[in-house]
Image: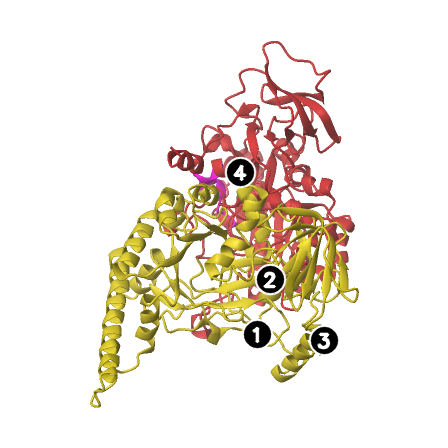
Amino acid sequence: MQPAISFLRSTKCRLFASLGLTILMVMGWAGAQDKPVVLRGGKVLTVTHGVIDNGAIVMEGGRITAVGDAGTIHVPAGARVIDVTGMTIYPGLIDSETQLGLTEISAEQTTNDLVELSDEIMPHMHTAEAFHAESALIPVARMNGITNAVIAPESADTLPGQDSFIQLAGADATEMLLIRDNAMPLNFTGDQRRNKGGFEKRKFPSTRMGLAAQLRQAFLDAQDYKLKWTDYERRKADAALNKEKDKKPEPLAPKRDLKSEALLPYLEGKKMIVLAAESPSDLETAVSLANEFKLKFVLNHISHSQPVLDYVAGLKVPVIVGPIYEAPKEDERYDTVYSLPAQLYKRGVKIVFASYSAHNVRNLPDQAGFATAFGLPYDEALKAITLNAAEIWGVAEQLGSLDVGKTANVVVANGDPLDVKTDVKQVFIAGREVPMSDRQVRLRDEYSK
Amino acid sequence: MRLISEKILVLYCVWLTVALASAAALGQAEATAGHDIVIKNAIVMTVTHGNITNGSIYIKDGKIAAVGETVNAPASATVIDAGGKYLTPGIIDSHSHIALDDDVNEATNPITPHMMMKDAFDYQDKAIYRALAGGVTTSLLLHGSANMIGGQAVVIKHKYGAARDEMLFPNAPRSIKFASGENPKRVYGSRDQLPSTRMGNFAVQREALVQAQDYMREWDNYNEKVKRGDKDATPPKHDLKLEALADVLRGKIMVQIHIYRADEMLTEIAMAKEFGYKIRAFHHALEAYKVADQIAANNIAIATFSDWWGFKQEAWDAIPWNATMSMRKGVRVAIKSDSEDYNRRLNQEAAKTMRYGGATEEEALKMITLSPAWIVGVDDRVGSIDVGKDADLVIWGGYPLSSYGVPEKVLIDGDVYFDRSLPGLGTTHYKEGE
């Protein structure tokens, strides 16, 4: 797969340069770390090069500048040295699907900006434009070591809009939105059908046939739209070239269509589709649709696709798996979904976890830990919320492991990152200490007086 | 929390007729009744008297007959070698709505104390088995929170595959569900009915209790007349609704209240004093930490979530320290599921209290065993590993108070109901396809 970042760096969208894909190249935190910090003495889980038992890590200018043994690490001049003996140090965790910043109180509709239900094809919705940076939910999540997350619209539409990739700290939304429109969900789970409330209330598309036809039309429209613009550009160039000779009027520009425009980077394979399906039949329909339009994709959920895991492995794409707490179907064993990550891993599929949540993002690592009880190797479980996620989202150069040169997103905890009992003591984002307080801590302290 | 489920449970295909299922289950029960079992080589977490490493349990007639480093058991007893693994009492979920086939709320009137959850109990619901596979052996199935006074609960044992009546917890005390806050006022307010405010909520509740007092007085008068030999005395009309509420006032039914906000807890405490009944537990109780002293002083327990928050306005002040802060103030605390999802891993939810507020291992375990047993009113029979109690036990793979604890075997009344090593569903009593 083409990493999103390298695309962002290398590609210029010729047709729509003027529309300005807003891309923030700054992977570090703009308000930079003021002096070097050394964490010395803890157990360092690097993710890429094993565990250093009595390790140390140096953070400078928002980046990791050294990782090694506590005894031999070079302490830069003026550095603040923090003794983390007995602690476990690991990279900031990455949640591959959340609704952070899109909701505050679930039942209070005025606080929700989760999905636009007026149409099923809404690729021109940008979660970045609804993202509420000051949400009380974000500090709650980051206090448990989640430093980065994908923000996705809810899955009630087949094409509900585009994701964002955020950092869970920053002065404002601009700093926190590391990549806008980094990917786009394409949901095909059956839940997108407008078939609720009896026949009299149904509207198109009320069946999977309807959903598929509508999707196909939307992609065809976007292809036509691209041709129209290509043709226009050609005629415009011709006119400019032959201006003196022909004295023809300048060709008229086609009308802009935001939906089609939004689909083009995906049709051109420049950005990634997050293809969601649960059952084998939906999965295969969705994959054939994606292939028909040569979309680049990762899979999402596939919670009930156990019978076709070899087929999944054959697709050679990563899977955002779960949530593994998804209830099994009536005829499935209690642990069918719990063991899905292990089954995929055995077949060589790269997996990542997501909380698919807003309020419960902090529990992301619990899920990874639980998957190990059903056969997923521990190191793979940790990778599934760090390095694998960074790779899938195209940010592995900056995130996902404790390696020199990467953004200094570092977590200090009193134990195993995947255990529910582990208490996170300090989180660093881009080398800066995140305040270890949130709304809940303040309430606790207020009522503990 | 669950008000009206959006999911419509699909009735799964049941191959056995009810009669056959009963016969098969009875046959199984006969085969094991009176059977002696010894579980040896376990780390026994008793909940009441510490852990016994390399401990054993002798089970006779479905009850715990002995527990210790060694136990005296007949040589003929079946031996289960726990292989050095952890063994705990079965988990008790003091707030559940599973196996009710979506008949959780009779949301047609805010006062429905005569609804009996037992009448909706769908004993073949696979949610019972999935919770069993998570170590749950007893659940309190409650009416929902649409009504200020909902129905009467049913207590079940998760003997998945057994006949319906075998799954009912024998002689469990009666519990009734009260509610408060957003749900009743939303349900009836959306229909332009009373209640649509919290004032309305409490007025509706008080009105019903006043009617019950009147009803009791009428019957007391009548009974007095009969006692005096008055042959002309005519009995008042029987009213199921008021009969149930009268039993609340007579202290015959335990009151379980769905409640979030601290102020409402204080109002419910005052209401209980006004009418002379006792509140057994506040359920959800996400703001209990704000008034824990007063909850403790009234001997009211709480059945709460470990860290759920923000799903509605009245859950906005929820904090994950609620359980431990309340416990330290003397409140009996249970962690419950209120969910078909979380009832499969309540052990992890309990473990979170060790992190948020530093509960000890035993305190955390108690929140899903002995404390919920007290809330349900069956703590003399289940909830700890003590001689004389029902042999409802879980053998765990991994440490139960962690992300890694998963039940390997679950016993109820001394009988193995779930075994992870078995194929199919891993259940011993439910036979698919027979």
Q: Check disc 4: other Cα within 10 Å, few if <14, some if 14-19, many if 20+.
A: some
Main secondary structure along the magenta-highlighted residues: loop
Q: Nearer the viewer, residue A70 or B296?
A: B296
Q: What chain letter is assigned to the residue under label 3?
A: B
Subunit under mark 1: B
Q: Which chain is red?
A: A
Query: On screen, B62 above or below B57?
Result: below
Secondary structure type for disc 1: loop
Q: Earlier in the sequence, mark 3 or mark 4?
A: 3
Instruction: Give the magenta-colored segment's residue range.
Output: A121-138
Question: Disc 2 marks which amino acid?
Answer: Gly
Q: CA distance from mark 2 to mark 1?
A: 38 Å
Colour of chain B, in one word, is yellow
Specify whether residue A135 is painted magenta: yes
| Quadrant the C terminus of chain A occupies | top left
Q: Earlier in the sequence, mark 2 or mark 3?
A: 3
* Residue nearest the viewer, comparing A213 with A283: A283
Q: Are marks 1 and 3 on the same chain?
A: yes
Seen at 24% across and 67% down, the residue is B210
Q: Chain of mark 4?
A: B
Image depth: mark 2 or mark 4 in front? 2
| Left or right of residue B356: residue A53 | right
Measured as percent of width and height from the top left, residue A415 is found at: 63, 34
Q: Where does residue B362 sit, x and y in percent of width and height?
A: 57, 46
Q: What residue is shown with label 1?
A: B11
User: Which residue is the site of mark 4?
Assistant: B358
Q: Nearer the viewer, residue B214 or A155?
A: B214
State yes or no: discs 2 and 4 in contact (Cβ < 8 Å): no
Q: Are marks 3 and 4 on the same chain?
A: yes
Q: Amino acid at mark 4?
A: Gly
Q: Quick one: label 2, few (<14), some, or many (20+) residues within 10 Å?
A: some
Q: Quadrant of the N terminus of chain A?
A: top right
